[in-house]
Structures are given as structure tokens and as C-alpha cells.
Amino acid sequence: MLKYFARAAAMLAVMVAPVLAQDDTRPTVAVLPFVNSAIGSNNAELEPLTKGIADLLITDLAQNPRIRVVERENIMKLLAEQDLARDGRVEDATAARIGKLLGAKHMVTGSFLTDKTGTMVVTIKSIDSETGRIEWAHVERGKIDEFLSIIAKVGSTANMGLKLPEIPAAARQTSEAKAEKQKKIPFAAVMMYSRAISAQDAGNKAEAVSLFKQTVQKFPDFADAQSALKKIESGE
């Protein structure tokens, strides 16, 4: 196991060097894929959300310029390279090691499930990569049709729970305006977006682009989908 992480360290040193500048002392957060705890037929149907929730939360947290958020692509490359989380789960100790490789103190992960009333329950926790201990945990509930509002609440709560620097007023206003605009985006759009993210991670760029385009065409107020489409088409 140690040789695998040593190899990963060398890979990450090149991969994230532009992001982790030596003079950048901002606290760093990384978000791992979430665990699908849905029961029965919902499990397979909601599987794309494991990546979708993480991606949406990364985007939400990154609106705070006073923190540094590791890009999802870098995290997924490391997980694939080391053959980690094959069952969709990452143990706390492993999350801490990944955090050290990424230069991220706060390793955020969690799970989700739905109940018969149409409520989505998102459980989130953060592992301190320096101590390997759970430093913060939270449970957020809301109607599935208000999914993006749930994610916005999770992001805001995480920022406070982890005692991260307060988001500047201008950035907060932009974030709140975005959340207000997107709160009526239906769950169908989130699922389409999540399938696009899964396709992208699987190396199916054409499928991902097609799904992002469909999402934007059907739901033009979905700003995250617009940004994701622009990013993948530009090759960033």
C-alpha cells in the first residue's frame, strides 16, 4: 500500500502543482464521491448522483475565494490510479492519506438516500487529513424537487462547520443570486447533469458533451451545467 501512495505522490506533484502554489496559504478542501445508500430500485437509478453531488458541492464551495478547492478531475485521477473506492466507499484513514497527497486538510465525503415521502437525506462529514479524525458532520434533508437548494445549504453549512474563512460580501451575493435562480431547476436536470459527469469520468467525452448540451437546452437557468459544458468543450 505504501508504494502505491508513494507513486501517487509523484503523480500528484505534477498534476496539482499549478493549483497548490507554495505561497498560497488558503485552507484547502477536497470533496470525494458520495456513497449511494438508496434502497431497492432507487439505488441503480440514483447511482450517477455519487459523482453529481460531489461535483455540485465542489462548485458551490469554490465560490469562496478565500479557500482552495481541489478540482474533481484531480481527485478522480488519483482514485482511478490507485484503484481506490471500487465499491464507492473510501475509509476515513484512506481519505486522510488522499488528503495529504492532494495537500488538502479537509476531506469531505458523505452519503445520500431517499425515503417514500420524496425526501432526500444527505449526510456529510469531513476528515482532518492531519489527524485522520472526523472533524465535522452534518445531515441535511429536503424534497427531491429542491435538490439544488439542498446542495446550497450543505455548502453554506460546510463553510461554517469547518470554520473556513467567511465568504466575501460580493461573492456571497453572487452565490445567493445563483442559488435563487437555480432553486427551481428540477431533479430531472440534476440527474441528467450527473450522468454527464459520470460519462466524463469514464472517458466518454462525446456522451458527456451531448448530455451537458441536452441539460442546458432543456434547463437554460442551470448555470452549473453551462459552466461544465464550456469547460469540457474548451478542453480545460
Image (cartoon, rainbow, N blue to C red):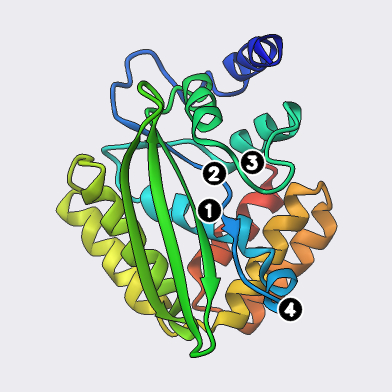
Identified by mark 2, the residue type is Leu
Identified by mark 4, the residue type is Ser
CB of mark 4 within 8 Å of CB of mark 3? no
The quadrant of the image that shows the C terminus is top right
| Residue beneath the point at 35% across and 71% down | 179
Q: Secondary structure at mark 3?
A: loop
Sequence-first disc among 4 and 3: 4
| Residue beneath the point at 67% across and 47% down | 234
Looking at the rendered image, the disc whose residue lies closer to the viewer, 1 or 3, is: 1
Identified by mark 3, the residue type is Glu
| Residue beneath the point at 33% across and 21% down | 24
Q: Secondary structure at mark 2?
A: loop
User: Which percent across, then down, holds residue 114?
Assistant: 54, 77
Q: Which mark is residue 41?
A: 4
Q: Which residue is mark 2?
A: 32
Q: CA distance from mark 2 to mark 1?
A: 6 Å
Looking at the rendered image, the disc whose residue lies closer to the viewer, 4 or 2, is: 4
Looking at the rendered image, the disc whose residue lies closer to the viewer, 1 or 4, is: 4
Q: Which residue is mark 3?
A: 236
> On the rendered structure, is 40 left or right of 158?
right
